[in-house]
Structures are given as structure tokens and as C-alpha cells.
Image: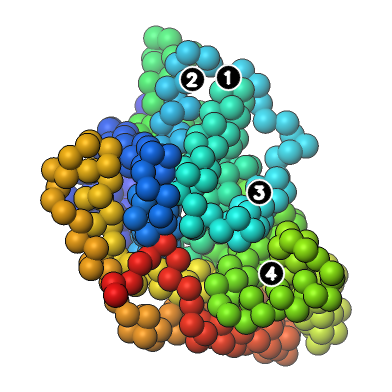
Amino acid sequence: MTAAPTTAPSAPARDLLRLPFIGVCLRWRHARLTLQVAALVAAAAVVLHGLLGPQIAPRNLATVVTWVHYRGLLVLALLAVGNLFCTGCPFVLVRDAARRVHVPARRWPRVLRRKWIGVALFAAVLFVYELYDLWSLPAATAWLVLGYFAAALAIDVLFRGASFCKYLCPIGQFNFVASTLSPFEVTARDVAVCRTCRTADCIRGRRAPDAPTTVLRRGCELDLFVPSKVGNLDCTFCLDCVQACPYDNVAIAARVPGAELADDRRRSGVGRLAARPDIAALAVLFTFGALLNAFAMVSPAYALEAWLARAMGATSEGPVLLAIFIATLIVLPLALLGGAAVVSWRLGGGIGSVQAIALRYALALIPLGFGLWLAHYSFHLLTGVLTIVPVVQSAAADLAGWPFLGAPLWRWVGLRPGAVFPIQIGFVLLGALGSFATAYALAERDAPSRPAAVAVPWTIVIALLAAAALWVLAQPMEMRAVELPG
């Protein structure tokens, strides 16, 4: 057995694991299991009521919980702490149970170890959501949740590690990108301690001294080696590394949100961001998808669809919506980012290649994208925050057969849209400021002698997107899955 390192770890100034009560809860061996069980129970209720309850969106758990509360709480948790919803993911709980019966032996194919499939699935979910108005279909939402469980189970009983989470899961890809703006990250307390470690338990798992093949505590399934881990990309906050490290040398440390976007160090499990076009594509989809998802809920979007339908001679929504998606998620980003990259290349005196510049600076859009997702999802959450009470009351009566929680309080809704709008403006402006700062930090690294000039085209792109976002949010937005009292 390897002797413990003699170097005393110097804990980060702010480490959640060192807080008196929170630290104890996070270190508890069954902390994640408890969250997963709670999430599984909630998912079961959502599916049952979605399939068996009234097919009225504002009165069904499936649509209200999924499209109002879950999404809103997800982005707020990412903003306040980190990737907490991946921590309590019930899909992983089900696949862990299945792995007790069938232990996967295969590795995920090397040729697929990029996020291209995840990017495509993320875009597909956005498209299907709009095409079929999933927010209004409780049964379809329930089947979507079941589909997630089935996909996670099918992939992860065949392949070792967390292949579904890392390469496929659309929710996971969203969380990975958004968590780059979170205020905490899992990291080493003292890298000097890690240098003397010979077992690498944080990634390999802690083994039994007398039986090296027996894993007592599993390590990181996403192949993130704590000493060389940088930021939150691909981190599910599972805290397996905390449980596995025999030297208590893992921290959940406070950091500057978004700083990792301008950090081009090679990072474990990810490599260098400048060499990952798939992550750049994910950043673009994350940002332009946020704008498109919000735009699809306002009246100008319906007017645009009607005009395109007439121009294309289309008799169904599918081709029209596909044209809008291609224009917004592919054509517009290529034009804006390509043009900005060319201008940056010229102003910077030919630094690197145009393609490399576009890939690097695409990451600068993430804070703005996150601000828009926050503005959009907080609108639904805050305007419908109290709807969970009457919907749970109604679901209990529907599933149990009698109203043991009392008569539903259908007049409980939330804030009026006008009261939420200033909050939305604040989120978008904060996101834009974060993007400006990231673009300038990248320019300082690329062209120390002329960072302001190199950052100018990206500043213009960010300002244009922020202005478009504010215009969209200023339009009357549909109250999806929320029923305002009469």
C-alpha cells in the first residue's frame, strides 16, 4: 500500500468540502445516491402523470415540471454552484443497477470520442421541441423522459465509463458548456500531494489492498484526472474522485466564472480547447440555440414562418422550421464568426489561421448564451413558480384516486411577465459583459501588443447578438405550460 504523501495540503481559500455542514453532506458516501433516488421518484411521477393524467399542459406534472421548473432550476443551480443536476442524474442510477447484472466490457469507439453526436442530438431536441410543441404534450414529454432512460441504459450497459454522459446526452452537453460559468469547480487542493501519489485513485478508483482488481470506490468515469483537470468541461460533479482519493486532496473550490474559456492549457479528458472544433460547434449551438429557442416563442417568429411557408410553397411546418434552424444555427454563425475571424486575423497581423481564430473565439460567446438561457428559463420559472403546488395536488388526486393533498389551488401562478423583464435584461447584459471580457482575454493572449484591435470584431458580434436577444425578450412571450388565472 502506498504511503500517504508527507506534503500537507493547503486548502483553497473557499472550498465547499471544508464548510461545517455542507462539507459533511457532500462528503457523505450516500449523498449522490440520495439525490438520485429523489430524482428517480420525481421522474417516475412525471412519467406516470404524463401518460395517465389529463393531457392539459398547465395541469400535468410532465409538462409543468419538465418545461417550467426543471429547466429553470437547472440554469439557476449552474449559476449559483455548478452542475448539480448531473450530480443527481437518475439515468445513471438506473444504469448502475443494470451494470450489477451485466458488466460492460467495451470501450467507446475512439473514432467517436468527440461531441459531434451530442451536438447533433442537442440540435435535434431543440428542433423536435418546436416542431411538435412538446411543452403542450404531457404524454410525449413522458415518452421523451423514458427515451432518455432507455438511451442511457442501452449505451452504458455496453460501454465502460460514462460514454452516454460524455459524448451523447444533450442535457449533459448543455450542462458542461453552461458550467464553464459556474463559480465552483472540482480540483486538487494541493498539486504537490498529487505528484507524490502513485495509485491515481481519483481516476482509477480505490482498490482493495489485498485484491487489486476489486474497486472499493470508483474513480472518474469521464477520464478527468484531478491534478491535470482544468475547469468544469465534462465534469458531472459526481464527486467520485472525492470518495476515491485516499489523501483527502480534492476540493470544490471557488473560482472566477468563465476564466477557463480563455485558458488554453491542455486539460485531462478534453485536451486543448483550440484543437477541439466539436467543442467550438457546441458553444455556437449553445449560444445561437438560446436565441432561436427564445425567438420561437414570440409573434414575429410565427409571422416569419407564415412568410416562409408562402415563399417555399410548404404545406407543413417541418420544412419551414428546418430552414429557420439551418439559417440560424449554421448559416448565420458561419457568416458572423467567419467574418469576425478574418477581420481579427488581419488586425492581428496574421496571427494563426482564420479557422483557428474562429474556433478559439467561438468560446467567447458562451457567457452571452448562458445569459440568454437564464433570461428565457427564468421567465418561465418565475411566472409559473407556484404552479407546482396545484399541479402536485391534482396529480396526487389523479394517481391515488382521492385528493389527499386538498383541492388544487389553481390561482397560484407566479410573477407577472412585466415584473420578470428587468431580471431578464440583467441576465443578458451580464452575459454580454462576460463575453466581452472573454474575447478581450483571448485577444490579450493572441496579440499582446494590440488586444483591443483584435477584439473589436468579436465585440461587434457579441453586441449584435445581445441586441437581438433584448429585442426578442421585449416581445410578448407565450406562457407555455402555465395557465394564468382568469
In the rendered structure, the answer to whether residue 26 lies left or right of residue 351 reads left
Q: Position of residue 29 (x, y in %)?
A: 28, 32
How far, Cα to Cα, is label 1 from label 2? Answer: 7 Å
Label 4, residues with CA under 10 Å away: few <14, some 14-19, many ≥20:
many
Residue on which disc 1 sits: 104
- Mark 3 or 4, nearer chain start: 3
365 and 361: which one is in front? 365
Any mark on residue 89, and which? none
Labelled pair 4, 1 in contact (Cβ < 8 Å): no
- Mark 3 or 2, nearer chain start: 2
Labelled pair 4, 2 in contact (Cβ < 8 Å): no
353, above or below 227, in the image: below
Labelled pair 3, 2 in contact (Cβ < 8 Å): no
- Mark 1 or 2, nearer chain start: 2
The amino acid marked with disc number 3 is Leu
Residue on which disc 3 sits: 121
Residue on which disc 4 sits: 362
Labelled pair 1, 2 in contact (Cβ < 8 Å): yes
The amino acid marked with disc number 1 is Pro
How far, Cα to Cα, is label 3 from label 4? Answer: 20 Å
207, above or below 142, in the image: above
Label 1, residues with CA under 10 Å away: few <14, some 14-19, many ≥20:
some
Q: Position of residue 57 (x, y in %)?
A: 42, 56
Foreground label between 3 and 2: 3
The quarter in which the C terminus is drawn is bottom left
The amino acid marked with disc number 4 is Ala
How far, Cα to Cα, is label 4 from label 1? Answer: 36 Å
How far, Cα to Cα, is label 1 from label 3? Answer: 24 Å
247 and 405: which one is in front? 405
